[in-house]
Image (cartoon, rainbow, N blue to C red):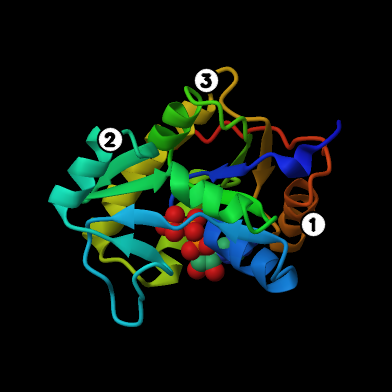
Amino acid sequence: MPNLINRPLVIFGPSGVGKGTLLKRIFAEFPNKFGFSVSHTTRAPRPGETDGKEYHFVTKERFKTLLSEDAFIEHAQFSGNYYGTSIQAVRAVRSTGRRCVLDIDSQGVRQIKKTDLDPIYLFISPPDMTTLRHRLRGRGTDSDHAIQRRLSIALSEIQYAREPGAYDYVIVNDDLEKAYALFKKVVLGEAIESDVLPPLAD
Ligand SMILES: Nc1ncnc2c1ncn2[C@@H]1O[C@H](COP(=O)(O)OP(=O)(O)OP(=O)(O)O)[C@@H](O)[C@H]1O
């Protein structure tokens, strides 16, 4: 399959599945090959975050103006805040000659499918729901309440992945080394034999 690397890569999957872990590793191994599109958000910056680096931090008013100007290829509301990927953010990565990688949720995937971005869609799947719960708890970044919320959202992400044509590839993040080896191939533009989507019944 030619030119897979020239197409943006969309990564999606339930919270806690390990998207961030895989991305961090690939960016560390290939610091100049890929670029993250910097999203806009209305949430407040956390300590250590810089405007224009982790996010473009904007007010709700500014976000709504950008929305009305069709500036976003996808946007979503999460925990009372807006998040969006602007066309400009993807272009900015492309202009550096790097492959653009987007880490978004299924709402965003649905919207991107209506655009001419033509990315590769990669779904990162947990081996089962028990493992996903353990990872969210083990990460230690969320309260029990927040974990419950993330898990219920996770179910809708998984439901979406079951829809025909939702993804080009699935990688089951069971053994991290195995998952990373496959992930690396996809990110470098190689065609892989996709994993099989597990049943993920609770
Ligand atoms: N293959 C794996 N085996 C065991 N633990 C893993 C594996 N992959 C990731 N983890 C651990 O699972 C937790 C969740 O991973 P991570 O934060 O990367 O998930 P995420 O998909 O980026 O979540 P979010 O969408 O909420 O940012 C982390 O503590 C991470 O170290």
Left or right of residue 142: residue 134: right
The numbered mark, 2 or 3, whose residue comes first in the sequence reads: 2
- Residue 80 visible in the shown view: no
In the picture shown, does residue 65 fall above or below 187?
A: above
The residue positioned farthest toward the left in the image shown = 61
Q: Which residue is mark 3?
A: 163
Relative placement, left or right, of 90 versus 188 is left
Residue type for callout 1: Ala
Gap in angstroms between the C-alphas marked 1 and 3: 26 Å
Q: What residue type is disc 2 on?
A: Glu
Q: Which residue is mark 2?
A: 69
Q: CA distance from mark 1 to mark 2?
A: 40 Å
Of the residues shown, which amino acid type is indicated by label 3?
Glu
Residue 179 x %, y %: 72, 54
Q: Residues within 10 Å of mark 1 (few under 14, many from 20)?
A: few
Answer few, some or many: residues within 10 Å of disc 2's Cα (few below 14, many 20 plus, some between 14 and 19).
few
Which residue is at a point 26% across and 58% down the rendered structure image? 146
Q: Which residue is mark 1?
A: 181
Quick one: label 1 or label 3, which is nearer the N terminus? 3
For the residue labelled by badge 3, is the local secondary structure a helix, a strand or a loop? loop
Residue at figure coordinates x 53%, y 61% from the top left: 20
Element type where label 1 sits in the image = helix
